[in-house]
Image (spheres, rainbow, N blue to C red):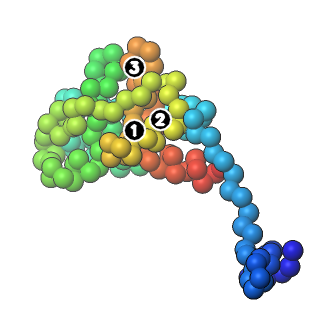
């Protein structure tokens, strides 16, 4: 080995002796074994379908969150309202969550992997996934930011 290419280790290769940079190997992240529950936010703020847009805005601002799952009487998700939903629909503050929510929330079971969640989010172009238990009760939320933060910490 010789020093070259701005002080990094390099090897000489071929007849011309041109340096070849030797880059450090990146660690392999096996997201197929990481449970989605490891990165989800457990303390979720939820609302009912009758909640006003004004109250949803207040909750998002107070808790610094980008979405609010809309749940039924049994804490099962029936929809989701995101900041983008509120911007796109230019919702009246007197409107209700039912009027502005996406009525189908993307959910994953608690035993799903990080890889499965990331793939679903990228193929369906969603930024939030709702994680549910075997009774379909909401137990957490995963955002693209949660995945990015986990990757950065690895």
Out of 42 and 5, give the one closest to the viewer. 5
Is residue 30 toward the left or the right of residue 128 in the image? right
Which of the 4 image quarters holds residue 141? top left
Check disc 1 and report its element: helix, strand or loop. Answer: helix
Kindly indicate whether the residue at mark 2 contacts the one at mark 1 (C-beta within 8 angstroms). yes
Which numbered tag is attached to residue 120? 1
**Spot occupied by residue 97 in the image (x, y as percentages of width and height):** 20, 36
Which numbered tag is attached to residue 137? 3
Check disc 2 and report its element: helix, strand or loop. Answer: helix
Q: Tag 3: Cα neighbours inside 10 Å, few (<14), some, or many (≥20)?
A: some
Which numbered tag is attached to residue 145? none
Kindly indicate whether the residue at mark 2 contacts the one at mark 3 (C-beta within 8 angstroms). no
Check disc 3 and report its element: helix, strand or loop. Answer: loop
**Spot occupied by residue 130 in the image (x, y as percentages of width and height):** 39, 32
Q: Above or below — where is 47 with respect to 26?
A: above
Looking at the image, can residue 26 be seen? yes
Out of 42 and 22, give the one closest to the viewer. 22
Out of 18 and 131, give the one closest to the viewer. 18
Q: Tag 1: Cα neighbours inside 10 Å, few (<14), some, or many (≥20)?
A: some
Per the image, the residue denoted by label 2 is: 116
Q: Is tag 3's residue or tag 2's residue first in the polypeptide sequence?
A: 2
Q: Residue at horizontal 33%, vertical 21%? A: 76
Q: From this viewpoint, which residue is outermost toward the top?
A: 135
Quadrant of the rendering where the N terminus is positioned = bottom right
């Amino acid at each position: 080995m010789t020093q070259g290419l701005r002080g990094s280790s390099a090897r000489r290769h071929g007849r011309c002796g041109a340096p070849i940079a030797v880059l450090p190997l990146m660690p392999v992240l096996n997201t197929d074994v990481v449970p989605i529950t490891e990165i989800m936010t457990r303390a979720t703020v939820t609302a009912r379908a009758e909640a006003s847009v004004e109250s949803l805005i207040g909750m998002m601002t107070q808790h610094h969150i980008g979405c609010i799952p809309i749940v039924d009487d049994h804490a099962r998700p029936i929809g989701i309202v995101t900041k983008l939903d509120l911007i796109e629909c230019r919702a009246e503050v007197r409107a209700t969550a039912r009027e502005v929510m996406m009525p189908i929330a993307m959910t994953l079971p608690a035993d799903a992997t990080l890889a499965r969640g990331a793939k679903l989010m990228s193929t369906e172009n969603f930024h939030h996934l709702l994680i549910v238990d075997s009774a379909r009760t909401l137990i957490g939320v995963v955002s693209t930011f949660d995945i990015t933060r986990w990757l950065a910490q690895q």
